[in-house]
Amino acid sequence: MKRNYYITKNCELKRKDNTIYLEYNDGRKPIPINDIESIYLFGEITLNTKAINFLCQNGITVHFFNYYGFYTGSLYPKETLLSGYLIVNQVQNYLDLDKRLTISKELIRTASHNILKNVKYYKKRIDELTDKVYRIEKEAENIENAKSISELMGCEGRIRSIYYSTFDEIMGSKFEFKTRVMNPPDNEMNALISFGNSLCYTAVLSEIYRTQLNPTISYLHEPGERRFSLALDISEVFKPILTDRVLFKLVNEKIIDKNDFDETLNFCYLKEDGRRKFIKEFDDKLATTINYPPLNRKVSYRTLIRLECYKLVKHILGISQYKGLKMWW
């Protein structure tokens, strides 16, 4: 099975014959091309055009993160799974407000369900979360009444705001978390959420690439220039499943602590060791398998993302109504 490679040490990435090599000051490590699903580059990594061309020829997405661990962009190889028919229908579903709202509402309906699933899990032990569950459920009722994308986004924002207000209780206030700040994150919890959401976004983007969907045509988020907005849409479904569950574990089991952050500048970011801890848990989560009743077999969380893309394809082509992945486990 192919797997992701996360490169966190400074090195040079080269091609020799049909193999990619990571060349460090103290040696080099080979990576067979057929073993690579995607590559994540953190820190100072040098690539030459020979290596880039080779990766593109083999359909391998490469995701770039800067020195502070913030996502900066992706090398998205030339698409080979082209379908003009699907693109036309993707656009038609965007231009028709009713059709666009139908998809967007299901995305938020699913994200809200998964958010509630997380909070209800901890409510069994924390009585203070009862009121937060009630408020999220009441706010989620407004999804059905939304007449525009902006109304829907407002509803989603309020749900997520209530959700984030549960984090101090869920994690015992190990890291103070008052409000979500992204650019740049101002404390440990915001740094963890930003880093985790970046990993979730890139995982979704890698799976979209394996389908015929065009990643720039989206429904909940406005399509724009220089971004793959469909990955933002589908990430809404998976952030509670992947990012949030990973960070709850990292903090509650004290795998990550204050020593894993650097706050010497006017913002907060994960140090290299902290990023490695998060990446390990996130990659383990992607590889975790669960029983998936529609296929009557076990599938990995990564496969669940691909299946979500296929469900969206079927909806866009009018084959079956899109029903998002609502956690049952």
Image: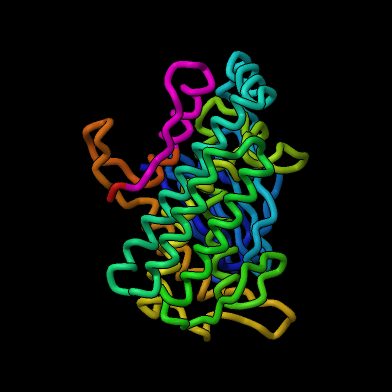
Q: Quadrant of the N terminus?
A: top left
Colour logic: rainbow
**In the image shown, does 23 or 186 lie closer to the viewer?**
186
In x, y percent, where is residue 241? 41, 54
Residue sitting nearer the eye, 171 or 56:
171
Up-down: is 307 above or below 236? above
Stretch in magenta: 306-327
Q: Is residue 35 above or below residue 133?
A: above
Residue 157 at x, y percent in the picture: 61, 55
Please say whether residue 30 is visible from this viewpoint: no
Q: Residue at x 51, y 53 (%)?
A: 139
Residue 248 visible in the picture: yes
Tally the numbered discs.
0
Identity of the residue drawn at 45% across and 65% down: 132
Residue 216 placement (x, y as % from top left) = 67, 34
Direction from residue 119 to residue 155 in the image, left or right: right
Query: Residue 225 appears in which quarter of the rendering?
Result: top right
Q: Is residue 40 left or right of residue 241?
A: right
